[in-house]
Image (tube, grey):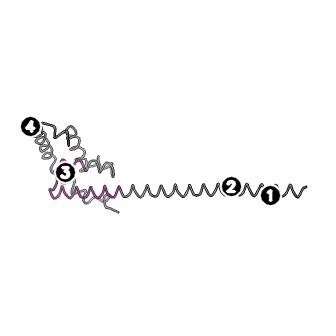
Amino acid sequence: MQDSIAIVVIVALMFLIGVLLWFIQIQLREFKRAKQTEANRHSQEEAGRQSAISSIRVLARCVVEDQIEYSEACIRLNVLLDAVLPELHAVTPYDVFARVSRELEAHPTHLARNKLPLKERRALDLERMKIEGRYREEILQAAKNLLQEESLVAT
C-alpha cells in the first residue's frame, strides 16, 4: 500500500514538474518575443531618427545653397528639430526656425491657400517675403551651423 502511495506521489510530482517546465517554457518564449519586439521598435526609432537627421542636413544644405524658400525650410526644420533635438529650439541660432514658423502659422497652406483670391495670395506672399528678409541672415547662419552640429552627425 505504501509503495502504491509513493508511486502516486512520485507520478503527481513528476506531472507537477512537467506542468511547471511547460509554464516556464511559455514564459521564456514570451520574454524572448517581447525582447525582440523591443529591439525592433528601437531599431525603427533609430532609423526614423537617422532619416530625420538626414533630412535636416539636406534642408540646411539647400538653405545654404539658396535652393529652397527660407520660410519653407524654417517650417520643415522646426518640425524635424522638434522630433530629433527639441532642446535646440531654445538655443541661438536655431531658435530662428521656431520664430519664423510661429510668424507663418496663420498663413494658409495647400488647398486653403489655393482657394484664396489671387490678391490675398499675393499679399500673403509679400508678408512671407518680408519675414524671410527680416530673418535671412539668421536663417542662413543657423543652417550653416546645423551642417556643423555634432549632435546631427549620422551614426
Quarter of the C terminus within the rendering:
bottom left
Identify the amino acid type marked 4: Lys
Query: Which residue is disc 2 drawn over?
Result: 20
Which residue is at a point 16% across and 47% down the rendered structure image? 135
Label 2 to label 3, Cα distance in Å? 65 Å
User: Which mark, residue 139?
Assistant: 3
In the image, what residue type sits under mark 2? Leu
Mark 2 residue element: helix
Q: Disc 1 and disc 4: Cα gap in Å?
A: 92 Å
Q: Residue 1's spot in the image, x, y percent?
A: 91, 55
What is the distance, in whole Å, between disc 3 and disc 1 at their CAs?
Answer: 80 Å
The reply to whether callout 2 and callout 1 are in contact (CB within 8 Å) is no
Mark 2 or 4 closer to N-term? 2
Q: Which structural element holds mark 1? A: helix
Residue placed furthest toward the bottom: 155
Say whether residue 125 is magenta: no
Q: Main secondary structure of the magenta part?
A: helix
Task: Categorize mark 1 by other alpha carbons within 10 Å: few (<14), some (14-19), many (20+).
Answer: few
Closer to the camera: disc 4 or disc 3?
4
